[in-house]
Image (cartoon, coloured by chain):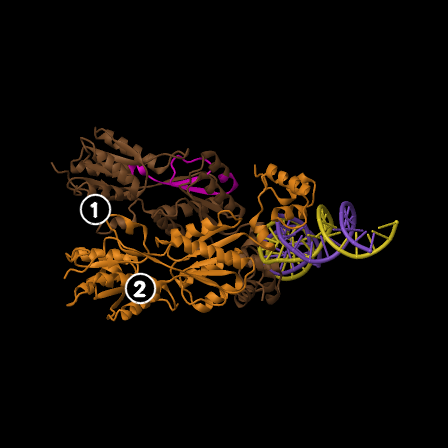
Chain colours: A brown, B orange, C purple, D yellow
Amino acid sequence: MTSGRVTIADVARRAGVSTAAVSKVVRGAYGVSAEMQAKVTQAIDELGYRPHAAARALRGRTYTLGVMLSDTRNPFFPDIIEGVTGRLGDTEYQVLLGPGGIEPKTQARMTDAMIDRSMDGLILISPVMADAELAAIATATPVVVVGRHGGSAAYDAVVDDDVMGAGLVVDHLVGLGHTRIAHITHLERARAQGLPHTVRAEGYRQAMRAHGLADDVLATSFTEEGGFEGARELLARDERPTAIFAGADIAALGVLRAADEAGLSVPEDLSVAGYDNIGIASLKRISLTSVDQDGQVIGATAARLLVERIEGRSRSVTSSVSPTLIVRGTTGPPRR
Amino acid sequence: MTSGRVTIADVARRAGVSTAAVSKVVRGAYGVSAEMQAKVTQAIDELGYRPHAAARALRGRTYTLGVMLSDTRNPFFPDIIEGVTGRLGDTEYQVLLGPGGIEPKTQARMTDAMIDRSMDGLILISPVMADAELAAIATATPVVVVGRHGGSAAYDAVVDDDVMGAGLVVDHLVGLGHTRIAHITHLERARAQGLPHTVRAEGYRQAMRAHGLADDVLATSFTEEGGFEGARELLARDERPTAIFAGADIAALGVLRAADEAGLSVPEDLSVAGYDNIGIASLKRISLTSVDQDGQVIGATAARLLVERIEGRSRSVTSSVSPTLIVRGTTGPPRR
DNA sequence: CTAACAATGGAGAACGTTCTACATAATACC
DNA sequence: GGTATTATGTAGAACGTTCTCCATTGTTAG
């Protein structure tokens, strides 16, 4: 059966015009009479013609945008994706996601693959590759980087204002009366700078300083286990903190487990806050105070910037999205 | 610098051979001398040549496999993706994910887009479209369907043995001494048959019958809210069940919340089990008994079948993966 | 009534591959 | 030494679009 795809030539034959004319109609280009428009549109509908993306790619647009995901497991991604696809829903662009893995090497392989497939533009979510490499990609194709501070002239960027987010948490805890507030962050592995956890830690330090309090940062990792280990260490100290602010919700869950095991009740003996406001944070059983980034807005913004860039803007833009604090059951005044 | 992509012609010029020869080397085709092989490989490395996927697509392979995801938010997908990419890691194939949404219409749009981009094959995860439409897609391109029972001659399928999984739960609960075991399922919206929840419900019924017990199925939805509402209804009955088996973990979380609110302790007053073994089920704070599908194996199997199919197999295959029961803290003997 | 111009449609050359034929060179066989 | 066979390399036609010229109409200006 070798399906025999309907081509632009088939449409042209059916409508009794040239392929060039059909192409014009399809692209909405200048120089088409109303009559031509009607004839061709009808033929397209009758035959069920759909332009072949690969053939298009050889000459111009492919109407495909790539989104490179680092960690597929991050429960925060779906929101971003939804924002992106939502924004693009009624345009001709299609979004494809590329699982890039967490290694710089695999991420590079993925972005290369996307460029090979001549995507019109790329959204890179929390890429870990070196700045130079990022810049190289950005000269090959329009790029928007999400979740990495300190942009470049070569690409656009959308970031959550992590300094502000961390500040919101500290302010909230201080307002409740806490003074010994510890922070659990992620151990820096990659050489990439400006990753969210670094900025959150810095924001925490700034806020603590602003309140005249001593900071206390412990670096483990943004996993349940990392949060658990970090909390265990913090809680074993002589003067244990009365509040722990984990740089990610998943780590905060580990902190909660450590509190359980240490027989501490939350929030009476220990307040716990996270970051990201992942879905389960709102489950009554967890009820975790967290910072919400509104991934939908981030995704939608990234999509908008990318399309603008593709369609000609050359000046680089960095958009910062303000987070909000969602107060739930894991934070409260310290027991005195 | 608009370097102008390195093409096969550049390589040919550099190596002093024809483009046809380079093409042969790149594809590892027959009829290349060792000397030719060396010359060309060197030229490729020197120039950093990478084949242009779109140009390839126009003639033959594109070495791109598409995975259509229905609900991006389903925490079970990452495992499948990992299985797929893991399996394909050392081949030339690249995997791109397409967020298809939960509507038949948007899913159809996505699969169309993937076909337009001449992907070599498609893995469809829990597609909701009608059987006929599925068959149509499968004639256009190789297809593997994941998570939908009752395959077709036109495509391969990988399914979790949901009947068995449901049986495992029922056997476990009966073994603990339960007799009033209710099941919460998802309300059928789509006309598609053979979706997991249907099969799980059927497996539950079969297993209950096998133990000589009366079944009790309530259809709400596979969301936290759905589980909550369902459990509330079940627990309000005169003879309330001593165990609730939710067809999905996310719903089981809602059941747990309902139990909390009703002042019932788990598992003493109520045993709760889910399905899918999502990541948070293992968190100590949740510790949910669940059925594990081993998404990695499912993904890897799907990838294997798809590649086989692309490379020539024509007979259709259905592969069934056996689930395992993970017993945790939410199930125990009923209080008498 | 002609010159200039705008509006419309079409021819045909790309784009970067693959792959079928075919030409040539090397080897085997008798 | 001649012929058949095999191994190796190349020419060149697709593949399905886009897009730059052109060619043909009308239409307007003078």
Could you tell me if residue A17 is visible in this image?
yes
Q: What numbered label is drawn on residue A288? A: none
Query: Is A212 above or below relative to A298?
Result: above
How far across and how far down the image is residue B315, in percent? Answer: 52, 65
Is residue A145 part of the magenta span, yes or no? yes
Q: Which residues are magenta?
A: A137-164
Q: Is residue A96 shown to the viewer in this render?
A: no
Q: Which of the pair A185/A311 is nearer the observer?
A: A185
* Left or right of residue A317: residue B282: left
Crowd band around label 1 with a 10 angstrom C-alpha radius: few (<14), some (14–19), many (20+): some
Q: Pointer 2: what residue?
A: B167
User: Mark 2: few, some, or many residues within 10 Å (few <14, many ≥20)?
Assistant: many
Residue lying farthest to the left in this orientation: A336
Q: Chain of mark 2?
A: B
Residue carrying label 1: A328
Q: Which structural element holds mark 1?
A: loop
